[in-house]
Image (cartoon, rainbow, N blue to C red):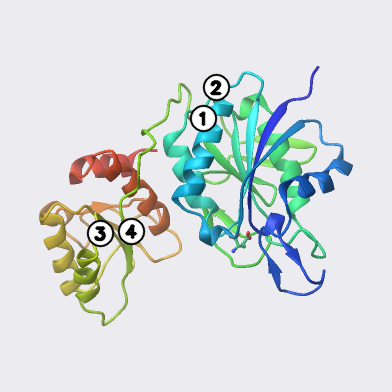
Amino acid sequence: MTAPRILVLGTGGTIAGAGASATGAAYRPGGLALEAMLGNLAALGLAAELVPQEVARIGSQDMGWPQWQALHAACTGALADPAIDGVIITHGTDTAEETAFLLDLTLPTHKPIVLVGAMRAADAVGADGMRNFANAVKVASYGRASWRGVMLVMGDAVLAARDARKAATSSIDAFRSFPRGPLARVTPSGLDWFGPPHRLGGAARHPFPDALPRVAILTAGAGMDEQPVTALLGIGCKGMVLAGMGQGNAPACVIAALAEAAAAGVPVVRSTRVDEGIVDRNVEVDDDALGFVAARALGPAKARVLLMVLIANGITKPAAVQAAFDGG
Ligand code: GLU
């Protein structure tokens, strides 16, 4: 049997991080070139042929439209190329959930696409990147990993892009999956799925946009006034995501200003600044009357990604936006 051929798209991050010392805290994300990183992996004897393509060498806090366009184009090519069995994207963990979700929304799912990162630089003592990468190879080269959308492999778990969330700044067990738990447990020698694929027949859910509109996240805080809403509209925001208190709440003056924005045709999505939980319609805020959308299980960062994609595709009416947020 021939080894699976995996396209490896490098973007930088801690998995390709290089520090001055194996025991110091300081390091530079993306300090290690993709070829050098794959060279380090050669000793592992991974049962796959890896085809490297460096897209960027950045900390993922700088990830944005140019890199997303390049990643989407490369994945589209790989999905159409019969010689490629799967795709691994090495990525910083700060925004891995946003890149993963954008690709999940805009790519078909007939081959595995896996993001992988690390919490410790490649040359740090106890580095987790090699194990995470070996796990990602296991997933990307496994046919039954198809039809599950874009996935994130971290800490021996396979998470669906829609559910994955960075929940700790430095522990190697940094990612959580909500509302679904992990799709699978993975180790370099084993892969156990917890259920059947959920994206069968999976065409892309939305066309990949030509450009992304400006959509802001506004975090609510006690005692705030409505002026940040006015300021964000003043710089041309085409959509707003409220990272609200609790069930997506905010002071009455802020809710009133957001309702004015919604009435003027700017989609407003209420999400929560709370770590985890569903924001439902019409609980304390009358979404029906005010023209708001409830983010359901999506946190603010992913709500912003979905709202950008929807607005770019001309979907701005609250009912249609809500239907996309309700989708699994
Ligand atoms: N801020 C960096 C990044 O997201 C480092 C975090 C990481 O990769 O774990 O690329």
Instruction: Between label 3 and label 4, give the one nearer the viewer.
Output: 3
Q: Residue at x 32, y 48 (%)?
A: 307
Q: Residue at x 68, y 66 (%)?
A: 28
Q: Is residue 1 at all visible to an observer of this figure? A: yes
The label shown at residue 76 is: 1
Residue 224: give x, y in percent of width and height. Answer: 26, 80
Label 4, label 1: how far apart the Cα atoms are: 31 Å
- Report whether 130 appears left or right of 178: right
- Report whether 245 appears left or right of 1: left
Q: Dot 2 lies on which element?
A: helix
Q: Mark 3 vs ligand 1: CB under 8 Å?
A: no
Label 3, label 4: how far apart the Cα atoms are: 17 Å
- Report whether 321 appears left or right of 36: left
Label 2, label 1: how far apart the Cα atoms are: 6 Å
The label shown at residue 237 is: 3
Residue 91, placed above or below residue 203: below
Q: Amino acid at mark 1?
A: Thr
The label shown at residue 271 is: 4
Name the residue that disc number 2 marks: 80
Question: Of label 1 and label 3, which has the lower sequence position?
Answer: 1
Q: Amino acid at mark 2?
A: Ala
